[in-house]
Image (cartoon, rainbow, N blue to C red):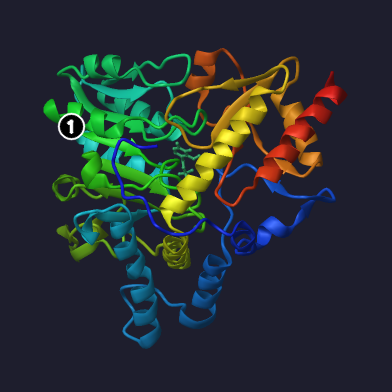
């Protein structure tokens, strides 16, 4: 599922009922029906250990970080900073100082756009993105292009939803200042060959930013093996609280980047004549952060460790195969994107039925899927559709849930026909 080899774990198969019991929300009903949550690419549900870590923090350790000279301040700072170590291990960063805490992928990409790219961009320069990007990996680049006179260019994809790597490489011309690519498409589920793209970028001295929002919940991430320059991810898709995320960047980039937000926590000394800044990552972390959220993020990483990413991926692989097989049998159902290397994120349409109408009927059956443009207007334009439905699975979903979802589509089609 990735172009980076990784060891396969020797853990026994998951006891799925026990796993589901870790996620209290999965036990609820919606419109009187058992919830079938297939909107995991939007945000994942949270295990009890994460909910309890946040609760415990506010009950026992709440204090501000890095500035309080008392026991609570120490406890809060240790719990918060421990997540930086866990994240460094999670993505195999060379150092914890390369982990900049952000509110999510969007903030991480904007930080690179304004702090790394904008000061370097000149009229005539370009930034290369792909046809399958989320708006978070398009709009920040457009904004800095507008300010600098640079332009955006777009690497094409095939109809089956795969990046055309040769075209991407051809587009890496000398005026490209940065390439920005999603690791995994939030619509098509496609896994892009990031290590290959990074190698080609490196040969030409072009920094590569990878949007890892949809990859981190499914694939082992090793930023050093991938060979990219920047990696952004979001905690809330990774079983952690909302408002958490990270930017990883090579230390050299972080040293060279000026601060983006100014304020407390990011300085060494402030005088009215001028201010000197803290070393990375703190120079990018102005103000009081989402402390409890990052404590919860640490608990989410512990939870993932306890399950094992390999076991999660193996289970998701099975669920994906089951879902694709069942969906392909539904008359009039069209899957958008058939990449060979993919995660369990499946965009689809049903002939003659509006995506929102079908999503509403599915909701009445307790099935939560997303319908819309998925913050990927250019991808919708490429496929010539205004919207699609999207079923996105997590390791805690079941075969029975997929079967119930397919049966609900059948009933909804009859109603809407
Ligand atoms: N990039 C991709 C591929 C995404 O799927 C998302 C969220 O849906 C984002 C970026 C933005 O993430 P966030 O809203 O957490 O910043």
Percent x, y of residue 21: 64, 64
Q: Is residue 256 left or right of residue 51?
A: left
Q: Secondary structure at mark 1?
A: helix
* Viewer-closest of 414 and 378: 414
Q: Which residue is mark 1?
A: 120
Quadrant of residue 63 in the image? bottom left
Check the image and report above or below for 284 versus 161: below
Q: Is residue 264 visible?
A: no
Q: Residue 37: horizontal and vertical position, in percent?
A: 66, 46
Residue located 35% across and 40% down the image: 110
Q: Position of residue 180 (x, y in %)?
A: 31, 31
Quadrant of the drawing holding the N terminus:
top left
Residue toward you, 207 or 221: 221
How many other residues sit within 10 Å of disc 1, few (<14), some (14-19) or many (≥20)? Answer: few
Q: Is residue 116 above or below residue 62?
A: above
Q: Looking at the image, which residue is at 24% across and 53% down?
A: 93
**Front residue of 129 and 141:** 129
Could you say where residue 9 lies in the image, as x and y percent from the top left? 38, 55
């Amino acid at each position: 599922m990735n172009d980076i080899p990784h060891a396969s774990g020797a853990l026994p198969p998951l006891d799925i009922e026990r796993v589901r019991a870790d996620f209290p929300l999965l036990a609820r009903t919606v419109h009187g029906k058992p919830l079938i949550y297939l909107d995991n690419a939007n945000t994942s549900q949270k295990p009890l250990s994460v909910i309890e870590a946040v609760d415990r923090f506010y009950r026992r350790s709440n204090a501000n970080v890095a500035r309080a000279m008392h026991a609570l301040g120490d406890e809060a700072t240790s719990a918060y900073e421990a997540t930086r170590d866990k994240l460094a291990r999670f993505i195999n960063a060379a150092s914890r100082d390369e982990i900049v805490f952000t509110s999510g992928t969007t903030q991480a990409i904007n930080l690179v756009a304004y702090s790394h790219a904008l000061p370097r961009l000149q009229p005539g320069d370009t930034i290369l993105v792909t046809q399958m990007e989320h708006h978070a990996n398009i709009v920040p680049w457009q904004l800095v292009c507008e300010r600098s006179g640079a332009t955006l260019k777009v690497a094409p994809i095939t109809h089956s939803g795969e990046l055309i790597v040769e075209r991407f490489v051809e587009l890496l011309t000398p005026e490209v200042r940065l390439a920005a690519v999603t690791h995994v498409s939030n619509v098509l589920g496609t896994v892009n060959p990031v290590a290959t793209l990074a190698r080609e970028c490196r040969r030409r001295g072009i920094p590569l930013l990878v949007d890892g929002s949809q990859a981190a919940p499914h694939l082992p991430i090793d930023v050093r093996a991938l060979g990219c320059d920047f990696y952004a991810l979001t905690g809330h898709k990774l079983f952690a609280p909302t408002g958490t995320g990270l930017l990883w960047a090579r230390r050299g980039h972080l040293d060279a980047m000026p601060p983006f937000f100014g304020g407390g926590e990011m300085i060494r000394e402030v005088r009215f004549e001028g201010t000197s800044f803290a070393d990375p990552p703190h120079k990018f972390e102005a103000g009081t952060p989402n402390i409890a959220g990052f404590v919860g993020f640490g608990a989410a990483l512990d939870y993932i460790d306890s399950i094992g990413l390999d076991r999660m991926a193996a289970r998701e692989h099975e669920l994906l195969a089951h879902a694709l097989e069942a969906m392909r049998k539904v008359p009039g159902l069209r899957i958008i994107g058939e990449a060979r290397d993919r995660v369990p994120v499946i965009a689809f349409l049903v002939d003659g039925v509006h995506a929102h109408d079908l999503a509403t009927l599915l909701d009445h059956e307790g099935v939560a899927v997303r319908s819309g443009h998925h913050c990927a207007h250019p991808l919708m334009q490429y496929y010539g559709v205004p919207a699609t439905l999207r079923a996105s699975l997590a390791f805690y979903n079941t075969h029975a849930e997929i079967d119930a979802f397919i049966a609900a589509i059948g009933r909804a089609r009859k109603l809407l026909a």
